[in-house]
Amino acid sequence: MAFDFILMLTRDDRTIPDARARLDEALEGGVRHIGFKDVGLPFDDLRAIADAIRAAGGRSYLEVVSLDAESELASARAAVDLDVDCLLGGTRAAEVTDITRHHPLRYYPFAGRITGHPSVLEGPPEDIVTAALRLADLEHVHGLDLLAYRFAGDVNDLMRRVCNVVDKPVIMAGSIDSAARIEACAAAGAAGFTVGTAAFEGAFPAESPDFTDQVRAILGMTGRARVASTAPRRIAMVAHDTRKAHLKAWARRFERLLLGHRLICTGGTGRMLEMAAPGLSIRRLQRGARGGDQQIGAMIAADELDAVIFFADPTVAHGGDMDLQALTRLAVLHDTPIALNAASADMVATALLTRP
């Protein structure tokens, strides 16, 4: 996640009665990350919403609101049964991961002590940071859900501290109702944020009172805030043998912008870039012929990449042409930017890496 707006079809911690109709309006507004809760509508209606999000090429989220163990585990089972992409919230990570570990969904539990309804985040910042670190160390926890604006202390400091110590994506949730708060989330290093009630109440300035324009307004604020995002980007970088020199030159040209970000490369490409730019953070996978391209494909499918840069040579037949075709298909399916030449790679760098 490069810094995404997640629209929750919820009000007062319940899925809204007209969620299916509002989903169509949201999709018209352009939002692609959409969630709901497992309370407020019958299960079959929730399944229809999840299916519709998937059919539209979006990413689906279910958020846990229950405070008791039985209800929270029921929510986890519902997330599996609904086949959503992400499960947000909850406080019983060990028990929940027993349910979700064999499902491809991504799990983001709450960090810190959660009380009340609507939920609030309590405790000293040190305890919240410690809890975040402990959760992030769990194998089947893929990120964290932080109720930052439901915390009574220094919210900006808390967001920065959690994002700085956790090596997994952090999503900010709860009471985000202004452009200033969206910008603060991005500046702190968040991977995304959720908005529910505030969007339906028209809290954000928009061209008209229509819900579709409210969604467009929030997306516009998200795009502007993304420029200031401090979250490290995760970018796969690959090249055909006849284009490796081109990729090397491109990486040297953008070396300053790439510093601090996480680059994932197939074996030969990674070794070349390590030698050309030792200061870059590079994770090497298998060589392409030994499955490196498939490893990148798996990362796309798991939403672990913000972009793919593959310098391809269309003038020469390659044994890995089917691998490139598969990567392109997965990037389209999972809405991941993919650049196949220097000009499009320049655009990716400008969009994802340029900071004010």
Image (cartoon, grey):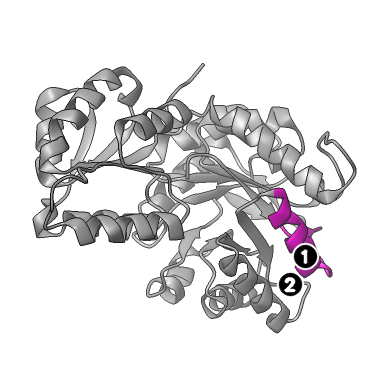
Say which of 159 and 262 sits in front.
262
Horizontal side of 214 relative to 337 (left or right) equals right
Q: Which residue type carries mark 2?
A: Val
Report whether residue 138 is seen.
Answer: no
Label 1: state its secondary structure.
strand
Q: Nearer the viewer, residue 132 or 59?
A: 59
Q: Residue at x 77, y 38 (%)?
A: 177
Badge 1 density bin: few <14, some 14–19, many ≥20, Cα 10 Å? some
> Could you say whether the residue bearing mark 2 is in a helix, strand or loop?
loop
The disc label shown at residue 39, or none: 2
How packed is label 2: few (under 14 Cα within 10 Å), some, or many (20 or more)? some
Kindly indicate whether the residue at mark 1 contacts the one at mark 2 (C-beta within 8 angstroms): yes
Mark yes or no: residue 82 visible. yes
| Span highlighted in magenta in the image | 8-29
Spot occupied by residue 356 in the image (x, y as percentages of width and height): 52, 16
Quick check: is 12 in the magenta stretch? yes
Tag 1 residue: 14
Taking the image as shown, residue 61 lies to the left or right of residue 136, namely right
Distance Cα–Cα, label 2 vs label 1? 5 Å
| Residue at the image position 56 percent from the left and 73 percent from the top | 79
